[in-house]
Image (spheres, helix red, strand yellow):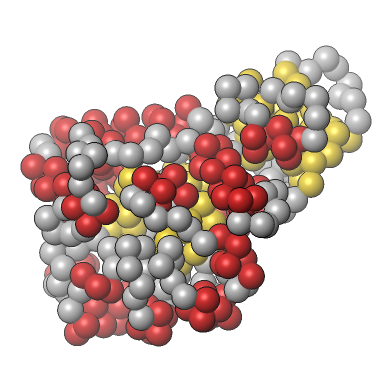
């Protein structure tokens, strides 16, 4: 079958077509396809959701609570709810979250999986797609060599809350353990309040999340170190924080996109990209940079092919949106929310 239209190739859209056979791209060309396409529109790669917490999809929100009351460990609403979940409820919550992502075109996601070994195993036992990169987390805010070893036997790395929640010696021991084994560490940084960026960088994180309360100097340090930063605009705004995107870009930071907690967001990466674009424009930057964040930087974070995702021989992981007849970047970012025509995810 053929899919045709305005195809995102790198950072630009080109008129062309893709021939697909049994889920594999077998042709890729410009102009009109040899046969009538099954669908035409704006064609983009499947999404990589760079930051999720899929276990809390079943958590009922309390809108009266602050950021700390909702998500701060160990007694925030989310953590209390997760601690009380049965194994069956946790697996059901994960299925709900992954189903939301799959339905809106996400093929890969990176999850900060709470709950120690049990939490990591619950996600590892779910059937892809979407494909999970599991960043496990110790069940307590302390270094336990035996528990950490049991988590990384299942998880792909460790994703912790923030430096503010940990004793320095425990966190240093955890980071040293991971680096000796060449296992990635990631963490939230300066989400609700500014944190010492030198302390964050001393842990040699593979990536960090949020940076809403970072200073310009903090941002420049992250940009200079080349540490990718995942932003979650809808979740940040829900929690009363506005990611300073224009300042981040001016500081040379590489931005990726995630949707964060499923208790306050639905995992729809197109909606997250739109929110990023609207914030960029409101802060005086080019809204189209949200497309680069979604389809280049976010894919690079998982070492997926960011520049040539539609090459012959690749899996046809893609999303097609109905075009509105104007500039495709503007249609995709601001006018495609109710116009999805096809999702192909393997």
Q: Quadrant of residue 68?
A: bottom left
Spot occupied by residue 223 in the image (x, y as percentages of width and height): 57, 75
Q: Is residue 100 above or below residue 182?
A: above
Q: Can residue 67 be spotted in the picture?
A: yes
Task: Name the residue located 65 percent from the left edge and 29 percent from the top edge.
Answer: 335
Q: Name the residue: 70% across, 53% down.
A: 286
Q: Quadrant of the N terminus?
A: top right
Residue 202 on image: x %, y %: 38, 84
Q: Residue at x 41, y 48 (%)?
A: 237
Residue furthest to the right = 31
> Would residue 306 be found to the left or right of residue 137 on screen?
right
Q: Residue at x 48, y 36 (%)?
A: 268
Q: Nearer the viewer, residue 181 or 88?
A: 88
Relative placement, left or right, of 14 versus 56 is: right
Q: Position of residue 301 (x, y in %)?
A: 53, 59
Q: Is residue 269 above or below residue 143?
A: above
């Amino acid at each position: 079958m053929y899919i045709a239209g305005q195809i995102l190739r790198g950072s630009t859209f080109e008129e062309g077509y893709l021939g697909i056979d049994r889920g594999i791209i077998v042709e890729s060309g410009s102009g009109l396809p040899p046969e009538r396409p099954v669908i035409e529109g704006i064609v983009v790669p499947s999404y990589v959701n760079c930051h999720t917490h899929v276990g809390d999809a079943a958590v009922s929100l309390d809108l009266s609570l602050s950021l700390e009351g909702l998500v701060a460990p160990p007694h925030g609403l989310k953590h209390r709810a997760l601690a009380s979940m049965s194994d069956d409820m946790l697996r059901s919550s994960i299925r709900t979250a992954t189903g939301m992502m799959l339905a809106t075109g996400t093929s890969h996601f990176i999850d900060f999986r709470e709950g120690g070994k049990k939490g990591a195993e619950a996600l590892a036992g779910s059937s892809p797609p979407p494909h999970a990169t599991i960043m496990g987390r110790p069940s307590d805010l302390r270094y336990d060599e035996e528990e950490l070893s049991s988590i990384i036997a299942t998880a792909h790395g460790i994703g912790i809350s923030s430096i503010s929640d940990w004793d320095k010696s425990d966190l240093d021991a955890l980071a040293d353990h991971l680096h000796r084994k060449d296992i990635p560490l990631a963490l939230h940084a300066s989400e609700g309040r500014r944190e010492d960026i030198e302390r964050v960088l001393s842990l040699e994180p593979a990536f960090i999340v949020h940076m809403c309360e970072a200073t310009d100097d903090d941002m420049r340090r992250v940009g200079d170190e080349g540490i990718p930063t995942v932003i979650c605009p809808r979740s940040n705004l829900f929690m009363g924080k506005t990611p300073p995107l224009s300042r981040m870009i001016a500081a040379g930071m590489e931005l990726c996109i995630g949707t964060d907690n499923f208790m306050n967001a639905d995992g729809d990466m197109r909606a997250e990209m739109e929110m990023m674009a609207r914030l960029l424009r409101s802060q005086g930057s080019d809204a189209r940079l949200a497309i680069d964040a979604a389809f280049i930087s976010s894919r690079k974070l998982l070492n997926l092919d960011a520049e040539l995702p539609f090459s012959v021989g690749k899996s046809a992981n893609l999303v097609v949106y109905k075009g509105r007849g104007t500039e495709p970047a503007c249609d995709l970012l601001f006018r495609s929310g109710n116009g999805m025509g096809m999702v192909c995810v393997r």
